[in-house]
Image: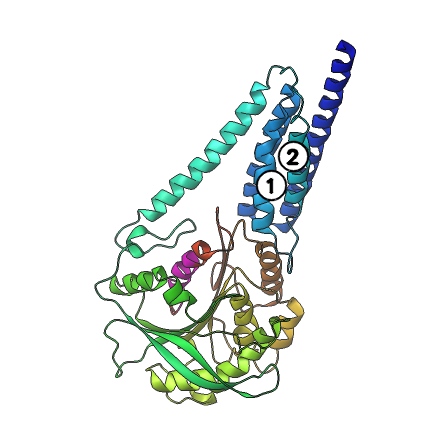
Amino acid sequence: MQDTRETSARKHDILNGAVMAVILTVGMVDIIRYIILGAAVPLITVCVVEIIFAALSYTAWKTGLSPVFLPVAAAGAVLFFTTTHFETTMFNSGFAVQAAAASVGTAGQIRRKYALRKPSAAAILAGAMTAVLALGAWYGNTAAARGIENTARRSVWAVPEQYDSRECEQAGTVEELTYQTKAYATDGRDVEKKALVYLPFGYDETQSYNILYLMHGTGDDEEYWLKTHPQNKIMIDQMIARGDIDPLIIVTPTFYVEDDCMDDLDQLTYSFREELRNDLMPLAESRYSTYAKSCDDQGFTESRDHRAFAGLSRGAVTMYHSALCGSLDYFSWFGAFSGSRTTADYFQETIQSEEFSDYPIHYLYVSSGNFDFALPGQIQDYKALTEIEPRLIEGVNTSFDIYPMRYHSIGSWHLALYNCLQKFFIR
């Protein structure tokens, strides 16, 4: 009987050791891949995660207490589904392997109990200190960013609380703009669509205003920025009232065209160019007071320094395809939040073509959360663009902010809007 128990315990140790080896090996591979990717914030993040995973796995192996693998299994599963998108990227699939391995290790002790051995104090201490320092840094920096007073400052941690926690006394208004367009991606039929328009407090038709076209992401609509998440409007009101940014007009359209292209939405990120130029802009800028002296090619080109386009997720892809690459003659300020999917070849074919090569790009603001599934692709596309495009100089008229502890969600995009508004329309 004793021999049987010892044999079973040895098998259990071998299983735990194998589980630990898988988790550590995958972790090392992931760290190497992030080193190659070449971005400091995600590299530091994955190093912290893997150190914690390694400490827990080593402790589970050395003590014989397999349930210590459970936090690794849970965290690995959460990180996999947060940082992976089956349609676009499996860059972080290593988290799934680690979660599966840790689950096997946890299951190994469900029915049997083994005598515990002395835990590894060093491993426990290393994991605990890493977790405490990481969470402490996140909490401390976020609290500091939330506590900023008086004037807006760019932040990679959080929007200051005073900018989105209470309604502004000098609040702007939001109107609906209905316009006629066509199904440019499919059969060209007539379609009626709607956009929301933000007008700043004290809007005066005798003055000219900068204008920002702001696009939502997959599965949302034109109400996403200003109504679904009203903290964005409150923040904009506060920034204008405090004098952090000049009053501006914001138009939030949608790239959806009824039920068209539901099996390939990327078509709409290209075809929106025609809708934007032919239908939306002429109506919006004839109805509201922008710098365009006429709503035609000449008027929009001459006023491009006062016009921006930004978007999130597939809205960021729309920005690249329909605004930066498709309408550089009409726009000079751009924002891409958690989305890209645009190759260097396409940039060369479009913005470096004879049609667009002479137009300056005043600013390209790119952002993502460090747990965002879009991040690896964004980094690769951003590097490819800045390597081939001499008009974009890092730290001068383009930047890439990676937000710690953020993922593909409104928390990241609210912060992105706050940051990019402080970059746009500044000469």
Mark 1: few, some, or many residues within 10 Å (few <14, many ≥20)?
many
Residue drawn at x 59%, y 35% as measured from the top left = 72
Q: Is residue 344 visible?
A: yes
**Location of residue 318 (image quadrant):** bottom right
Query: Quick check: marks 2 and 1 in contact, CB under 8 Å?
Result: yes
Residue under label 2, please give it. 102
SS class, disc 1: helix
Of residues 329 and 326, the one nearer the viewer is: 326
Marking on residue 319 = none
Q: Is residue 164 left or right of residue 419?
A: left
Quadrant of the rendering where the N terminus is positioned: top right
Of residues 45 and 268, the one nearer the viewer is: 268
Work out whether 156 lies above or below 177: above
x%, y% of residue 263? Answer: 64, 71
Residue under label 1, please give it. 76
Work out whether 71 lies above or below 112: below
131 is within the stretch colored magenta: no
| Amino acid type shown at disc 1 | Gly
Q: Is residue 51 visible?
A: no
420 is within the stretch colored magenta: yes
x%, y% of residue 38? Answer: 61, 50
Q: Could you tell which of marks 2 and 1 lies nearer the N-terminus? A: 1
x%, y% of residue 205? Answer: 27, 83
Mark 2: few, some, or many residues within 10 Å (few <14, many ≥20)?
many
Q: Is residue 174 left or right of residue 134?
A: left
Residue drawn at x 35%, y 85% as measured from the top left = 287
Quadrant of the rendering where the C terminus is positioned: bottom left
| Amino acid type shown at disc 2 | Ala
**Location of residue 414 (image quadrant):** bottom left
SS class, disc 2: helix
Q: Which residues are magenta?
A: 414-424
Q: How is the image coloured?
A: rainbow
